[in-house]
Structure formats: structure tokens, C-alpha cells
Amino acid sequence: MGHANTLVGKAAVMEGLPDHPAVTAILAWSPEALTDAKFDRDELTLTIAPEEIRAAAAAVQAAGYNFFEDMTAVDWFPSSPRFQLSYHILSHAYKERIRLRVLVEETAPSVASITPVWPAANYYEREVFDLFGIRFEEHPNLRRILMPDDWQGHPLRKDYPVEGYR
Amino acid sequence: MTDVSGTPILEAPLAEGATDQHMVLNMGPQHPSTHGVLRLVLEIDGEIVVRLYPEIGYLHTGIEKTCEAKFYQQVVPLTDRVDYLGPMANNLCYCLAVEKLLDLEIPQKAQWMRVLLAELTRLNSHLIWLGTHAMDIGALTVFLYTFREREDILRLFEAISGQRMMTSYIRIGGLAMEPPLDFLDRVQRFIRTFPEKIDEYSNLLTGNPIFRNRLMGVGHLSSADAVALGVTGPVMRASGIDFDLRRDMPYSSYEKFQFRVPISTDGDVWARYLLRLDEMRESVKIIQQALDGMPEGAIKADAPKIVLPDREKMKTQMEALIHHFKIVTEGFAVPAGEVYQGIESGHGQMGYYVVSDGTAKPYRVHMRYPSFATLQALETMCRGRMLADVVAVVGSIDIVLGEIDR
């Protein structure tokens, strides 16, 4: 254990991990789309501009990060931007995982769906839509998945009480 | 913003080119072969499946929301209830994630015990899969045999944790308590006879012509589809993807164990059946190595402000009593950050994503469970096949609705 090297910020990660396949792939594709980066506890987090997430997913997929493992959201209420989306992408070849992070504004939260890149994201995006109320553009079937269809509100938001509305 | 796009499936138009023969059939959520409360809406042409739509959420309890209101150590019992057939795997994955946030060093003995228990859990999970899968196909006898051995495993769990199913034995920083004195001997006795039992199941099923005909060539999933749809675990490996987190991204000292990862390229229900039998044999080998090489030493990390003290110390030492009181009433603060920890559970890749804001309660706990993603591949496996094959395919992907709905 022991996390000797923690790299905070885009410049530090570019300097500390110059040969990392995901970092080089993102930089070769579009350096401006990478807004922030962090290497902490042996996990690499790349923050992507919200409008670029689908293209970024395609770029890391082409770089060998072939497996979509997980996707979810975090509600940073009352901070702004309010929502964070975390995509966990695994590489079978490098035996390594990266996290793509997208920050989404509170009003009419919406990002492009990555289902054209990984169909596996289908249920995960539906789950985030259901529980956080973030929309995914061009999703093939954006409906509630866990809560009933006629449910009001999005339970995993921080301003939604744990006991629900009585 | 709260409006829902898309159409409820029962009101959706039939598939393109549908004729009068197409009908929509509802299966579940109380159908015995759906292993819980899975509801499948099928569009069928005669007996051929044209479309299949899984409807889930009947078991949704909002565990992730509940976690945010609990102290870190109070989340452990909640994790038991997610995949209720693999409690120790849930505990392990969550604890590893929090330990990563805390940067805790776990003693060797605790790590090896965790491996041993994780493999017993895998056997437990696979035994239930085998019994119920065979029962779905109509081979009722096997269920009685696999549940006989499962009962032995549950007795072991009861001996070590006091609970048969909701064990909560793996805790943040190590294990809940020392295992009973004869525990390792009891595991050894179980392991000594278990390979014969696997042969016994195999004798009942592998040569059975009805079982073979129901399984062979059914529910095919290509390796490209397996990756695209997020399928993991035995189903992915039966489709030819050679990846196992225990071997490729080891955790909890798995790198010190020698075992083979079974692979098949056939990608059908039959391949998944043979592969899981093989996995059980490999698990037995891992448990044997854990028993043979079990290190001596502590079972809890040396972190008095995080790990509860022994009862004896608590009753005799003031410091221990204070720490106990503080942990129980106030919890312990975890440094801010986010981690994702994946492990290989009986069903595939399980993952816990834990976000901390520096307080004693997790800011966000997200659980990635393998069955949730595997369910997406169900339509691909069933489309164009007979309706009766759906039962065989659902059995072969080994889903647990508790982990899908959370």
C-alpha cells in the first residue's frame, strides 16, 4: 500500500504520467477537452468537458480501454456545477482502470449518451436518469429503470430526504 | 425534467415487419424460473422470440441512499443484503474500497482468511446456481444434492460469524473476530470430500441427454457482444474473453495463489455450465492453498481509532473503552477522495465506488453488480430462439435480483 505519488492537476498528471496510454490518447485527440486530471490512490481520473464525453469515450476505447465497467453520478448539492458523472473504463490489455469525470450544471442537466460507443451504458444511464434526473441525449430508451414509471422526484439527489416524502 | 421519454413496453408497437401471429407475452415477476422478481416482456412469433424486454426494480430498496445516512462501519451489514447469495464477497468489496480511502494496512492472516471466505462464498453461489439451473431444466434431483453441500458451507459461515447468510464477518480493517479454534479443520474436512461431490453433480447432468439437448448451442453470445454489453464473470469467460480480476488485477493477496482461469470459446449455455463446474474445482484448490499456508498473526489492522477493540481489552483497558465508545457513537472520519474497488464475485465483476467528503458517513456509495449488466445481454442471447430456451438462458447467466435492483 502507500500512495507515494499523488498528482493533482492537468499539468502534474501530464508531467508525471507522460506515457500513460489514456493520457496520450486524450491529448492526441483533443487537449482542450481535458479540463482537469488527478492521480490519487493508484487511480487516474480525467475530467472531460461535458460536451465532449462521447468523443472522449471513443478516444479511450480506441486506445485500448475496451471495457465499460461502471457509470454513476454524485450530487455535490449545493455546489456548482452540481452533478459529477463518473465513468469507470477498464482495459483488458493493460489490466488497468481509468475514471472519466464530467461535471454537469444543475439547470436542465444533460449530456450526450455514450451508448453508441458502449451499448453496455444503456442501463447505467437509465439508472442515473431515474435516480438523479440527468438526461442523456440520443439514448435509445431513456425511461425510469428502478423506480416506478409514475414516480415523482429523483431519490439519490441530496435534497431528497432519506425517508422519502411522507 | 421529470418527464420520461420512450414508451412503456406493453404499449410499444410491435417489431418492424410484425404479422398477425406476433403476440406479447408477460413472464414474471412471480415466475419460478426468474430467480426472484424479474419480469420479462416477450414479443413472440409462434414460439420464436422476436424481442425481449427485462423490467426490473421490483426489489429496489434504495440501499445506496441508505448508505449515505450511515457511518462507514454501519454500511457493512447493508452490503450483505445486496447479493444475498454471496455475503462475504459484498463485505470484502466494500471493505477493500474503504480501506483504500483510509490507506489501511491489513494483516496477512486477515487477507488470507478473506481469500478463503471469498472462495467458499463462490462455491455457495455456484451451488445455488447449479441446483436452480438444473431444476429449471427439469432435473429436480440435483437441487437436493447441491443444497446438501450448501448447507455445509452455511454451517461454516454460522460457526465463524454467528449467522448463516447475512454474515457481516469481513469488517473495515480486518475481520470481526478470531475464527473458532476448529474452523480451519472443519473447512479442511469439507474440502477433502467436495471434489467428489462435483463429480457427483457432473455424473447426474453432463451425460444426461435431455440436459445436453436443452443446453447445447442455446443462448449463444459472441465475445464482441459480451464486451459491448458489459458482461463479466463466467458468462464472459465462456464467450472467450480471458479476464479474471483475481488473476489480472489481484486484491487481498490473490497474487500469492496458484489457480487456473477456465476459458471456453463456445459461448453457449452448455459452455457456461462446464465452465462453472471447472471454477468450483479451482476454488477448492485456492481454499486448500489458503489452509496450507495460513499465516499467523493478527486479524485486525493496528488502527485503534478505526477498528473496534477486542471485548476483553475493552473491559480492562480505559483507552480501548474510549476508542470503542467513540467509534460506535461518532464513527470515524475518512479522508476525502473517491475510489473504485473491483473484485471477482461468483457472478462476475463486482465494484464499489465510494466517495468521501472527509466526514464519518460516506458521501456516495455506488455498487456495480455483475447481474445488472449481464441482464442487458439477455435479449441478444434469446432473440430468434425458442421461448423455452429463455428459461435455460436466464438460468445460465446466474442473476440475483437483489443485486440488480439494490
Image (cartoon, rainbow, N blue to C red):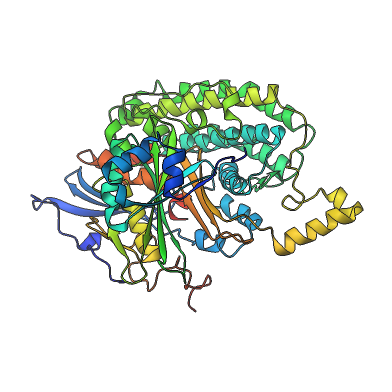
- Left or right: residue B395 compared with residue B200: left
| Residue pictured at 17% horizontal, 53% vertical | B23
- Left or right: residue B375 compared with residue B5: right
In the rendering, at what x and y percent does residue A19 appear? 40, 33
- Whether residue B331 is visible here, answered yes or no, is yes
**Viewer-closest of B56 and B369:** B369
In the rendering, at what x and y percent does residue B27 appear? 31, 52
Q: Is residue B2 above or below residue B346?
A: below
| Residue pictured at 89% horizontal, 56% vertical | B318
**Residue B5 picture quarter:** bottom left
State which quarter of the image contains the N terminus of chain B. Answer: bottom left
**Residue B112 picture quarter:** top right
- Left or right: residue B154 compared with residue B328: left
Name of the residue lying farthest toward the bottom: A166
Number of dots carrying numbers: 0
In the rendering, at what x and y percent does residue B31 appear? 38, 51
In the rendering, at what x and y percent does residue B24 appear? 21, 55
Q: Is residue B167 above or below residue B243?
A: below
- Whether residue B33 is visible here, answered yes or no, is no
**Residue B10 picture quarter:** bottom left
